[in-house]
Each structure stands twice: as structure tokens, then as C-alpha cells.
Amino acid sequence: MTFNDTERIILARYIAEDNLEHANEVSASVNVRNTIYSKYVKRIIDIILSGLALLITLPINLIIAVVTIFDVGRPIFFHQKRIGKDCKEFEITKFRNMTNDTDEQGNLLLPKDRVTKWGKFVRKTSLDELLNFWSIFKGDMSLIGPRPLTCNYLERYSQRHKMRHAVRPGLECPHIIKTAPSGSKWQDQFENDIWYVENVSFITDVKMVFSLIRLVFDRQSTASRGSAKRGAFMGYDENGVAMNNSDIPEKYIERMYGEYGQKISKESLESKETVSNV
């Protein structure tokens, strides 16, 4: 079952009211690893490598810019706030690859219905990530680290998973240990992010860089990321496990429709959730 932006906000609030406190109670604490590498050396490496990457990819970005104009028109850039280190907001910039098509009620169509053919190609080849090198160069991101997610997720995190923001977000945080989960679910991704926060080192980053290179050329993983099959992070179930919009218990759906009716106006809430690529 699919929900629009406003419905997801309402459902996430219901879920947090019932389960977030318990999720915090059953979650283990996080031991952030602070070393000379994580504080200083990692940032120097980010500046050098992202600067080189910006120069090398400049011709590619120019080509993408031209194609984007013909594909979706102006503006060619998509700007969105994300949560960075220490839970501070920053803005990412990407080339647009989705239209602004809406349904009969004026709501934006689902991302999968708005992505153009060119957009699907850009996502599958990870070309949509190239402008992130500018965010790395500025210091908002790092080459390796937990992926930056949208601001509306911040109030849904448990205290443990909120610690994924103890480091700069990165292009990707690949799974490199056999005991780590596959990352196909939010719980898997968040726990892998926490593992990174507790184990960040030069050797860990080198291993993850090689894993990231393999990930880029893995057609199955890039296709999965591009189509956002995981769904939106909605909070935690009664066992403290992170869940998406397909895992929502029926009682919350019934409660929402009972209180707000079948049609929920976007104006019924002061805050609105923005559909994004994660």
C-alpha cells in the first residue's frame, strides 16, 4: 500500500508515540571512535581526492547538464536539505532526473513514475552522485560514511541510530564484514552505519573504497538503489526494529483514516515531507 507525503508524516508520528521510547530502551549504546585519523587525516584525504574528482569529472558534468536541459528543462539542479554530522542540516545538489508530474489531486506522483529514461540511466550508472564531490570538498560530506538521509527522518531515529550522524555522511558505507547484514532493510543499513562509527580507520576506509568501486559496477545493487525499493523509513516496530512503509501495522492505517478520513489535505499539517532519493 502506498501513502502520500502527509499520510507518511501522520503514520510516523503514531508509530513514534507507541514505539520510540521502547526502541531507545532496548538499544545498545554507541562508542564513537575518535582518533587522529578520524579527526584530521580523513578530512585532508577528502579534500585532495574530491578536488581531483571535481576536475576529472568536469567534462562529464557539463554533458549531463546539457542533456538534463533537454530532458526535464530548467532548473537543471535539484536542491535538498539533508542531515549531516552532529545532526546539522546541509544542502545537497544533484542534476534533476524527475518530472514534476502530479495526480488529479495535485499530489506529486511516486518517484518511480516521475523518473525519466535518462534519469534511470544516470542512477544506474551512479552519475547522479558526481556532484556530491562538491559537498565533500566543502566539508559537508566525506568519501566514506553513512549515506545522508532526509531531514524528516531525524525525529524518527532511536538514540542509537541517531549516532550515525557522529561522523560526516558519505557517498556510501558499504558492508565489508561477514557478520554485517546485507543492507536490504533500514535496520541493516543503520546497524552497519553504527558499526562504521565505532570502527572508522584508514584501513576500514580503504576496504570500503574498493567495495564502493565494486558496488558502482554491480548492476543489481545500483538498480535497487536507483528505484528506491526499500521504501521510506517510518520508525520502529514493537521490538525496536526499524521498518519501512510496507511494514506498517494495520491499526495505524485504520487510526489515520478514522481521524482524518480517506482524503487528507496537505494543509492539515504545518510540516510537509519531501519525496527524495535516498
Image (cartoon, grey):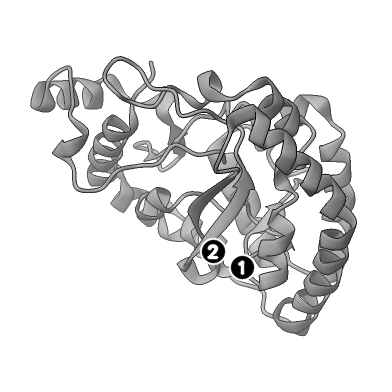
Q: Position of residue 159 (x, y in %)?
A: 42, 60
Total numbered labels: 2
| Mark 2, secondary structure of its residue | loop
Which residue is at 82% across, 39% downward? 215
> Do labels 1 and 2 touch, CB within 8 Å?
yes
Looking at the image, which is closer to me, 238 or 184?
Answer: 184
Which label was assigned to residue 140? 1
CA separation in Å, label 1 and label 2: 7 Å
> Three-letter amino acid code at disc 2?
Gly
The N terminus: image quadrant: top left
Mark 1 or 2: in front is 1
* Rendered position, 212 above or below 103: below
> Three-letter amino acid code at disc 1?
Asp
Q: Earlier in the sequence, mark 1 or mark 2?
A: 2
Which residue is at 75% across, 27% downward? 121
| Label 1 Cα neighbours within 10 Å, binned few <14 / some 14-19 / many ≥20 | many
Looking at the image, which is closer to me, 272 or 245?
Answer: 272
| Label 2 Cα neighbours within 10 Å, binned few <14 / some 14-19 / many ≥20 | many
User: Can residue 177 be seen in this snapshot?
Assistant: no
239 sits to left or right of 52: left
* Rendered position, 139 above or below 107: below
